[in-house]
Image (cartoon, rainbow, N blue to C red):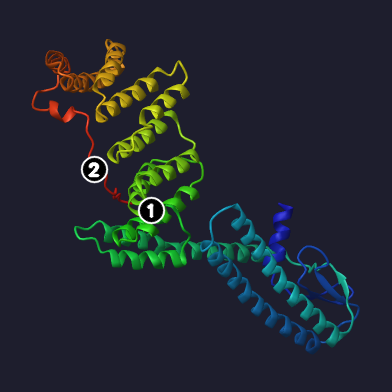
């Protein structure tokens, strides 16, 4: 509490001059924590003291303007630089350096003015004798300034939410207004910090404007920006990166980038399985499926022996991919073991229904019509719905999400 009161007194006390018990004149200087006063062993006249105080007030006005401009300048430097620990530290250093430089400059100018007008002074602590009421007033003014700063920051960021809402609305109408969305995006990026959300929005806007390179770079940036953390949004980002880089370069290069960025993320086994699904479907669609089954085998080896659930779903996906690749006999072999495992287990009842249907289609492909029909019956899926369970995939498209 004592430290807090000292800080409030340093930054909130507007008193610049007083006379001590010996009637010596003491002026407040620009030091913050030590030797905060300049004492003269004489009693200066009112005109002399007034002239010094007028000069000090003029310095303070200029310094206060500089103190407002410095954080604004550093803020814009920060939001237009690459976000990382180095940029944060650099901006903090820049802020401290600029504030210190101008305060030291003001202090030197004030010291020279004091010496020029009243001669040499003695450094001391600036300790005016304040009444309890005056101390309370200083504290009240200090807290009021803090509240004003906080409210001003809040008001400054309100338009950011309006801009994001306007971009979102522009992009999700029946006929997207890409020019409006692009203009709003540029305004946002000029005045507000880049967030994962704005990168996603900007990638969508650029894609709609046929700026594939820009959209791809936005996805790369947001994946780097988010670090090792993996989120639900990353599924869309990775899928759209594959789709865009395929058009910019080649499917093989898109897969290389996909693998590179995937290794940078820390994922749960379930997230790894879902990402492997995206990668495998892309590989099969683009006829570069040589490593698909090996990827699933590697995934199975990475799981613990007791992790039966994830092994079950990885093998299910592997069988699905084998069907898509035309290796129906191998798919049937895996479906056999999966169905045997899932039978009489309540937790796998929904999966069992799909497995019967998928094995039925695989059996039909190898000419086992009787076995296929039996699987379709065992699946208990209505005949008019059974075709929707055949393993298949839709051609990849750009995924448009609402933000």
Seen from the viewer's position, the closer of residues 113 and 348 is 348
| Residue in the picture at 41% in, 62% down | 160
Q: Quadrant of residue 165?
A: bottom left
Residue located 44% across and 51% down the image? 220
Residue 392 x, y percent position in the rendering: 22, 33
Instruction: Give how far across and how far down residue 118 sits, in percent.
Output: 86, 85
Q: Residue at x 29, y 49 (%)?
A: 398
N-terminal of the pair, mark 2 or mark 1, is: 1
Pointers 2 and 1 in contact (C-beta within 8 Å): no
| Disc 2 crowd, CA 10 A, few/some/many (<14, 14-19, 20+) | few
Depth check: give the residue in front, 341 or 130.
Answer: 341
Question: Could you say whether the residue bearing mark 1 is in a helix, strand or loop?
Answer: helix
Q: Which residue is mark 1?
A: 200
Spot occupied by residue 330 in the image (x, y as percentages of width and height): 28, 19
Kindly give the residue lying farthest to the left in the view shown: 384
Q: Is residue 237 above or below residue 23?
A: above
* 38 in relation to 306, above or below: below
Work out whether residue 351 can be spotted: yes
Question: Residue beneath label 2, please?
Answer: 395
Q: Which mark is residue 100?
A: none
Q: Quadrant of residue 354?
A: top left
* 276, 7: nearer the viewer: 276
Tell me the residue at 77%/81% (across/down).
Answer: 109
Q: In the figure, is residue 341 to the left or right of 381?
A: right
């Amino acid at each position: 509490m004592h430290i807090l009161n000292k800080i409030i007194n340093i930054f909130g006390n507007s008193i610049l001059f007083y006379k001590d018990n010996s009637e010596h004149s003491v002026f407040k200087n620009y030091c913050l924590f030590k030797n905060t006063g300049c004492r003269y062993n004489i009693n200066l006249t009112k005109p002399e003291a007034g002239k010094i105080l007028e000069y000090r007030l003029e310095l303070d006005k200029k310094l206060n303007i500089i103190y407002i401009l410095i954080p604004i300048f550093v803020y814009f430097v920060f939001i237009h630089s690459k976000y990382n620990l180095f940029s944060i530290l650099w901006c903090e250093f820049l802020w401290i350096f600029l504030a210190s430089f101008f305060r030291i400059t003001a202090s030197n100018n004030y010291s020279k003015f004091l010496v020029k007008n009243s001669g040499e002074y003695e450094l001391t602590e600036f300790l005016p004798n304040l009444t309890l009421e005056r101390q309370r007033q200083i504290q009240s003014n200090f807290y009021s300034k803090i509240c004003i700063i906080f409210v001003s920051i809040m008001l400054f960021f309100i338009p950011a939410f309006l801009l994001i809402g306007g971009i979102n609305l522009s992009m999700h109408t029946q006929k997207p207004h890409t020019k409006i969305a692009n203009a709003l995006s540029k305004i946002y990026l000029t005045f507000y910090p880049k967030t994962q959300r704005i990168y996603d929005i900007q990638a969508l806007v650029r894609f709609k404007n046929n700026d594939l390179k820009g959209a791809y770079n936005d996805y790369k940036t947001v994946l780097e920006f988010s670090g090792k953390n993996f989120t639900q949004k990353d599924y869309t980002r990775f899928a759209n990166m594959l789709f865009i880089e395929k058009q910019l370069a080649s499917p093989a290069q898109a897969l290389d980038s996909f693998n590179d960025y995937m290794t940078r993320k820390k994922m749960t086994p379930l997230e790894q399985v879902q990402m492997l699904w995206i990668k495998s479907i892309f590989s099969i669609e683009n006829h570069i499926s040589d490593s698909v089954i090996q990827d699933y085998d590697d995934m199975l080896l990475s799981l613990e022996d007791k992790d039966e659930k994830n092994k079950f779903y990885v093998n299910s996906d592997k069988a699905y991919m084998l069907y898509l690749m035309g290796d129906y006999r191998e798919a049937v072999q895996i479906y056999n073991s999966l169905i045997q495992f899932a039978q009489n287990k309540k937790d796998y009842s929904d999966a069992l229904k799909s497995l019967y249907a998928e094995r039925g289609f695989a059996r039909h492909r190898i000419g086992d019509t009787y076995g296929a029909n039996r699987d379709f019956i065992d699946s208990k899926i209505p005949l008019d719905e059974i075709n929707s369970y055949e393993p298949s995939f839709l051609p990849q498209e750009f995924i448009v999400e609402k933000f």
